[in-house]
Amino acid sequence: MTKRVDEPTGTTTVGHEWDGIEELDTPLPRWWLIIFVACIVFAAGYVVVYPAIPMRHAATAGVFGWSSRGDLAAEVTAERTRKASTLAAIAALPIEALPAQPQLLRTAIEGGRAAFKVHCVQCHGSGAAGSIGYPNLNDDDWLWGGDLTSIEYTLTHGIRNPDHDETRQSQMPPFADVLQAAEIDQLVAHVRNISGQGKPSGAGAALFETNCSACHGTAGKGGREFGAPNLTDGIWLYGGDKAAVRVSIAKAHAGVMPRWNSRLDPVTIRMLAAYVHSLGGGEAPPAPVVAVAPEGKADVGA
Amino acid sequence: MSALDLISPSSPLYQKRKGVFPKAVDGFYRRLKWAVMAITLTIYYVTPWLRWDRGAYAPDQAVLIDLAHRRFYMFSIEIWPQEFYYVAGLLVMAGIGLFLVTSAVGRAWCGYACPQTVWTDLFVHVERAIDGDRNAQIRLAKAPWTFEKTVKRLNKWSIWLLIALLTGGAWVFYFADAPTLARDLVSMQAPFVAYATIGVLTTTTFLLGGFMREQVCIYMCPWPRIQTAMLDEKSLIVTYKDWRGEPRSAGLKKAQAMEADYPVETFGIAKARIGDCIDCNQCVAVCPTGIDIREGPQIGCITCALCIDACDKVMTQIGRPRGLIDYATLDDAVIEKAGGTARPVWRTLLRPRTLIYFTIWAGIGAAMLFSLGQRDRLDISVAADRNPRHVQLSDGSIRNSFTVKLRNMETRPRSVDLVVSGLPEAVVWSEVGSRETAGPRLRVPLAPDATTQLRLFVAAPATGEEHVEFRIVAQPTDGAPGSREARPARDDVVFERPEREDDE
Ligand code: SF4
Ligand code: SF4
């Protein structure tokens, strides 16, 4: 290792040589060194005031007491405060008036979307498409009514809640106790026929008139006051093939939905109703919805 | 490095900045630099205040980077985020432009146009106005802190600070409506980020232009390394013609005495013994980075060419031809050393490498201009709902839902008809309509210069293929048929039906 003075620059080399390449021992600029030292001091200070050193269970807390969880809590509180007036406005309005307030409606739908993901997806699925026994909320078939007010009522009071007077209530009898197996088969044929499947059955039609028309109507179009399904359409909560219809008639189904007024506040329920209504099958209220032009979002680019 | 080296290093650990006190100079290149400074500073300070009428729905600032609304306005051009490739194209052009300039005339960017150079130059002039020229400055720097020195320093620093403040202040006007922001800034109602930006830029301008100067170029900036690597033996760089200048004589008088000793006829012999450089150090005195160009090309040289001006003046005084220090290529140096004449400058500038760079540069520019003229100002993108993919409706038909984004990039309200093509018997409606009002087309009003988003429901009979590719077309309702305005936007999507179950 020979240190020598590099002729053009007049600087000493560090003494190493790699394939003829040598390194000059140029002194650092003073300002550079000052910044370097300042960074070290800053780092030391950082370790003291912020959580830094990992210990057995958690890192050192730091004298500022800062934590990312605390930041989150503060942000959530700030967001709640920011939203409070909008939520109050949603709560103050009757739900039928919501569509006339596009801003509020939008907020309500988004709020409902969030709440749905927490409370409803367990039965109705994350896309609200339901499954056998759990209604698809995207379609245009409603047992108890698909306008905003009806949906909000169903959400609030639930379906077939034994402990609640205002709950949606109905009960189809199991016809295995009333009819012979052959009669049930005839009924199945008739029910399938009025929804456009299979051949007509005269005996089935007669049985239907006697046993079913009280709730489902003579034509089988159902009735919302009893939550009686429309049997003539293409949508089957428990399946539309022969076996499924036979089980429905013989054993009867009585799905239950919790009443949400015991768990959620009225605004959340209202927002849930707005969300469900927005999924595509929502029905107009008795008074027509004011048609509103979709609003342009000025800052959305991509 | 051995441990001993760390304990007692052979050279000092750090080095204080050596003061640089550039002397005032006049000449062709100095005037060129004045002109460039005037132009660049004017562009920088004035641009945000230029107005450009875009109608009621867009800002009227000629150049505006609207980060909040994600728009970039430049005179008649408006760029949306998804068109950012135009900005990328500009950056590519800037890069290739730098290659072009550097391979032709070396570090001309550094010497004339770099903000660090321009503002340092400005600060140096302020310094000169207050402290006097080089010698007075050196004296003042060495002098103890008297009252007079303090006053001078405070004066200088406050003017620097004012310039720095204006510099930082001008920057933020590019990002908001300048007159409004100026009013808000004064009344302390501007957003915090505006003040913070001004604060940071004021500090950096003050420190980098006033105190760091050539340290930025030598230690901080990556350009010198990149640019030096892009130079070749045909690039014009500031060169001390040592074959002409060496050996140096010491001082003007001695040179004149020698000139007298050797009459013109014998000059050829005299030249062999004595060079044109009289070692007056003027080139070093004027150098803003404090280097001696006579030591050869070096990283500290930003090719500001002020030493050329200084040396030319000296050469005139001693009656020698100008250009002892001059722009020259390494090839020229070889030729001239051998007694030949250098190639004309235009041949140096026009050579394959620069021509190729120029062609690429101009090609990208032309392509961008062409595509800017051709680009569509209406755009549609459709995303299908994935959950659920299809919904069975009570009348037996199938519904698919889509999120449609319509970008109306014109600064006026428009409306389009959404039409489904390639899906027989399909009807469409939106979240504000209903199945009852559904039809084969849907009129959608579009807000000016904005994205309109809507949910689109499409229903079609259950009979048909499981996956049907079809197209959603946004047909403008305005614009003469065949014109660019009337050009529809379209997006291809798939209509999904449930898997077919066999009837029992
Ligand atoms: S070295 Fe860097 S900072 Fe200095 S003039 Fe060149 S580009 Fe500007
Ligand atoms: S050596 Fe000459 S060209 Fe280079 S920076 Fe100094 S004055 Fe400018």
Image: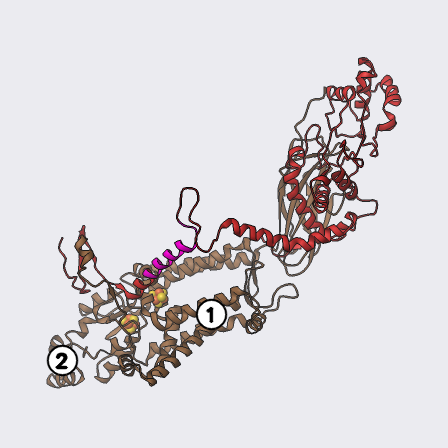
Q: Visible in this render: residue B105?
A: no
Marker count (numbered): 2
Residue indicated by mark 1: B168
- Label 1 crowding class (10 Å Cα cut-off): few <14, some 14-19, many 20+? many
Span shown in magenta: A37-52
Which three-letter amino acid code belongs to the residue tagged 2? Phe
Which three-letter amino acid code belongs to the residue tagged 1? Gly
Among the 4 quarters of the image, the one containing residue B25: bottom left
- Label 2 crowding class (10 Å Cα cut-off): few <14, some 14-19, many 20+? some
In the image, residue B245 lies at what x, y percent? 18, 74
In the image, residue B193 lies at what x, y percent? 52, 64
Lower position in the chain sequence, tag 1 or tag 2: 1
Residue B319 circle label:
none
In the image, which lettered chain appears brown? B
Residue indicated by mark 2: B267
Query: Label 1 to label 2, Cα distance in Å?
Result: 57 Å
Q: Work out whether residue A290 or residue B314 is closer to the camera in this orientation and state it.
A: A290
In the image, residue B341 lies at what x, y percent? 23, 70
Q: Is residue A46 magenta?
A: yes
Q: Are marks 1 and 2 in contact (CB under 8 Å)?
A: no
In the image, which lettered chain appears red? A
